[in-house]
Amino acid sequence: MANQKFTKLIVIALFCEAIIGCDSVSPTIPPILFGPAQNPSSVAPILSPSYRPTPSPSISSPDPEVQKPLSPNPYPFYLLPLGQGIKAAYWPSFTGFPASSINTSYFTHIYYAFLLPEPATYRLNITSFDLEKLLEFTGTICTLNPPVKTLLSIGGGGNDPNVFSKMASNKSTRAIFINSTIEIARKYGFDGIDLDWEFPANDTDMSNLALLLKQWREALEKEANITQKARLLLTSAVYYASKITLFVVPPTYPGDAIGRYLDWVSPMCFDYHGSWDRVTGEHSALNDPNSNISTSFGIQSWFQVGVPPEKIVMGLPLYGRTWKLQDPNMNEIGSPAAGPGPGDGILIYSQILEFNNQNNATIKFDKLSCSFYSFAGPSWVGYDDVGSVKLKVRFALARSLRGYFFWALGQDLDWVIPREASNVWGYG
Ligand SMILES: *[C@@H]1O[C@H](CO)[C@@H](O)[C@H](O)[C@H]1NC(C)=O
Ligand SMILES: *[C@@H]1O[C@H](CO)[C@@H](O)[C@H](O)[C@H]1NC(C)=O
Ligand SMILES: *[C@@H]1O[C@H](CO)[C@@H](O)[C@H](O)[C@H]1NC(C)=O
Ligand SMILES: *[C@@H]1O[C@H](CO)[C@@H](O)[C@H](O)[C@H]1NC(C)=O
Ligand SMILES: *[C@@H]1O[C@H](CO)[C@@H](O)[C@H](O)[C@H]1NC(C)=O
Ligand SMILES: *[C@@H]1O[C@H](CO)[C@@H](O)[C@H](O)[C@H]1NC(C)=O
Ligand SMILES: *[C@@H]1O[C@H](CO)[C@@H](O)[C@H](O)[C@H]1NC(C)=O
Ligand SMILES: *[C@@H]1O[C@H](CO)[C@@H](O)[C@H](O)[C@H]1NC(C)=O
């Protein structure tokens, strides 16, 4: 019964796709986190205290290198050859989902999430928990078929941005951090390193991020030359858009350095809305004619700062966000809400299917945002399902992006979403 309804909706979604084409909907140029985001809504008044931005004074970088113009790009961009697409996913070490359960058929790259730098020394802190998980991950992943590449991700939604800020502000501390990341990545057999600094908060942080990426890439090249090993990849998860509107004075990412020194960058195209908003919303909306908070705006904003499409790997959530409706009869997107719904505001995909089933929820597909929502009584969930993820992958293809990634492994059932996404992507 529930399955029938489900199938019907997918058919509707695909039909809409045929007549509208997700990326032709509202081309307003102009619409995270890992872990469930802290509260990355750009609606300033409702931000959680931890994201309350401090006004930043004018840029005054302590590092003279910031002022220097960049030299010609030593790392040319390549056109995307067949087989070079990225289908990635994060493996959260802290949820208990076993690494041995990963079906690597649907992925090219798996990220280990996360390690953190020690606040005092900036070397990676490997606690006994991390050690156990690192050994589980690295001991398992190489036995899986087909093989995948692995990246060690540093930071995440729970990180202290001040540690990254301080580390990045000084050439010697950058060097210590970089050295530690290379040592650990090599020790545990990773193919690359991923930075998830959430978030650089002002122009000084952004200039220092550019310096960090340059120094890091140079160190990786050098290490590869010395050891004669394949160079470690360098990637970064970033805010969905190139300008971080979480802050009163929104800083812009250094697009030039990102395009040059990273192998790819991964905008976190989710957490646009959540129970911190007073109305329901789609947290991974593809389009939103009423705001800049959407994936189409975010991706365009990365182009605008000079990051080429073949360096962009778009984020897709395997979880939804929930609200408690003020009035169960007002159950559209944008309806008044009275706080978090089931799961205290977050349900992972498998829980959403269960919620829909158990409550005989009404399920709707919204063409504009390319998202689903469901409701039962006062409970409301905005989320992605197979149909909407397929449309978003088509959007990534239409924009010639490098690929896509999921947050996070273990949140879906039976791999249905990664499998269908992979089928649409078609290669690599
Ligand atoms: C959306 O972005 C455009 C271009 O960056 C900007 O001009 C406009 O002010 C933004 N709109 C809002 C509501 O922030
Ligand atoms: C920039 O933000 C960092 C936190 O990320 C803060 O420590 C630093 O003082 C800020 N710098 C300026 C110039 O505002
Ligand atoms: C992984 O997925 C592939 C493709 O769907 C399937 O053939 C294979 O049996 C799956 N592997 C496992 C271990 O379930
Ligand atoms: C490493 O992390 C653990 C757990 O958070 C903490 O107790 C310990 O003090 C950290 N070590 C250093 C050197 O910062
Ligand atoms: C940079 O860090 C090094 C090593 O921690 C320290 O000796 C030096 O004083 C720092 N420089 C500045 C400008 O803070
Ligand atoms: C890290 O620093 C140590 C100590 O200076 C050095 O022996 C090692 O070669 C460095 N590793 C890398 C990858 O630079
Ligand atoms: C690495 O080696 C290549 C050629 O073998 C050279 O062109 C390049 O400059 C070297 N890079 C570094 C950082 O040493
Ligand atoms: C489930 O909801 C539909 C309307 O969406 C209704 O027709 C049906 O009777 C409901 N079934 C149960 C078991 O509540």
Image: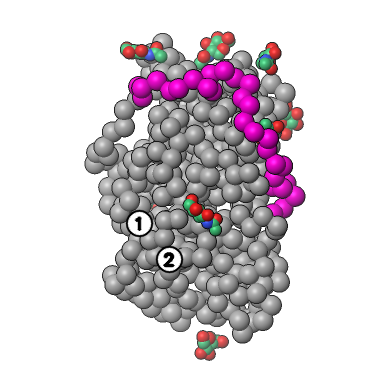
- Residue at the spot 48% in from the left edge and 64% down from the top edge: 288
Read off the magenta span.
47-74
Disc with the residue nearer the chain's start (2 vs 1):
2
Q: Distance between the residues labelled 2 and 1?
A: 10 Å
In this image, 94 relative to 408: left or right? right
Which numbered dot is residue 395?
1
The secondary structure making up most of the magenta span is loop
Q: Quadrant of residue 385?
A: bottom left
Q: What is the three-letter code of the residue carrying label 1?
A: Phe
Work out whether residue 32 or residue 66 is closer to the camera in this orientation and state it.
66
Q: Is residue 209 magenta?
A: no
Identify the image's colour scheme: rainbow, by chain, secondary structure or one colour.
one colour
The answer to whether 271 is drawn above or below residue 227 in the figure is below
In this image, 48 relative to 79: left or right? right
- Picture quarter with the C terminus: top left
Circles 2, 1 touching at the beta carbon (< 8 Å): yes
- Residue at the spot 68% in from the left edge and 35% down from the top edge: 57
Residue 424, percent from left and from top: 31, 57
In this image, 284 relative to 423: left or right? right
Q: What is the three-letter code of the residue carrying label 2?
A: Cys
